[in-house]
Amino acid sequence: MRVKRAGMLTKLLILILLVATVTTYLNLRKELRVLSDQRVTLERQNAKQRQENDALSAAIAQKDDPERLAAVARERLGYVAPGEIVFYDSGN
């Protein structure tokens, strides 16, 4: 009778270990999937940031270009060259 009891305990222990192993494996797969999605998102953000950095580097390289300065003055500051006429749309 004692042999059967030890056999049942052994089987129960193996079953518990198997369930724990499978549960851990499934949790790790889920975590891996989440981390993979995060990696893709971060790679996209990184690429977008690199494009912004390249654009800013190009703008810095053109900082002394008179045409660029005139364009910035017109767009951001609303400057107008002498002799130009500005029309404003009051409908909006």
Image: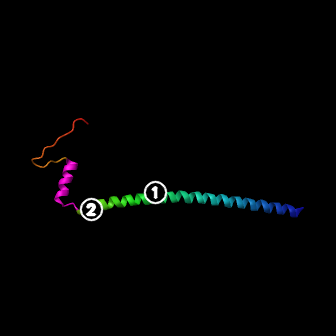
Numbered mark located on residue 41 in the image: 1
Percent from the top left, x then y, of residue 78?
Answer: 19, 46
Neighbour tally class for label 2: few under 14, some 14-19, many 20 plus, Cα within 10 Å: few
Residue under the point 36% across and 61% down: 50
Spot occupied by residue 13 in the image (x, y as percentages of width and height)? 76, 61
| Residue beneath the point at 80% across and 60% down | 9
**Residue 91 horizontal/vertical position (percent):** 24, 35
How far is mark 1 from mark 2, CA to CA?
26 Å
Secondary-structure class at tag 2? helix
Could you say which disc has been placed on residue 52 in the image? none
Between discs 1 and 2, the one toward the N terminus: 1
Most extreme residue toward the left is 83
Per the rendered image, the range of residues in magenta is 62-77
Residue closest to the eye, 10 or 85: 85
Q: Is residue 39 magenta?
A: no
Mark 2, residue position: 58
Instruction: Determine whether, in the image, residue 25 is placed left or right of residue 91.
Output: right
**Quick one: SS at disc 1?**
helix
Q: How is the image coloured?
A: rainbow
Q: Which amino acid type is marked by label 1?
A: Thr
Image quadrant in which the N terminus is located: bottom right
| Magenta span includes 63 | yes
Between 45 and 17, the one lying in front of the other is 45
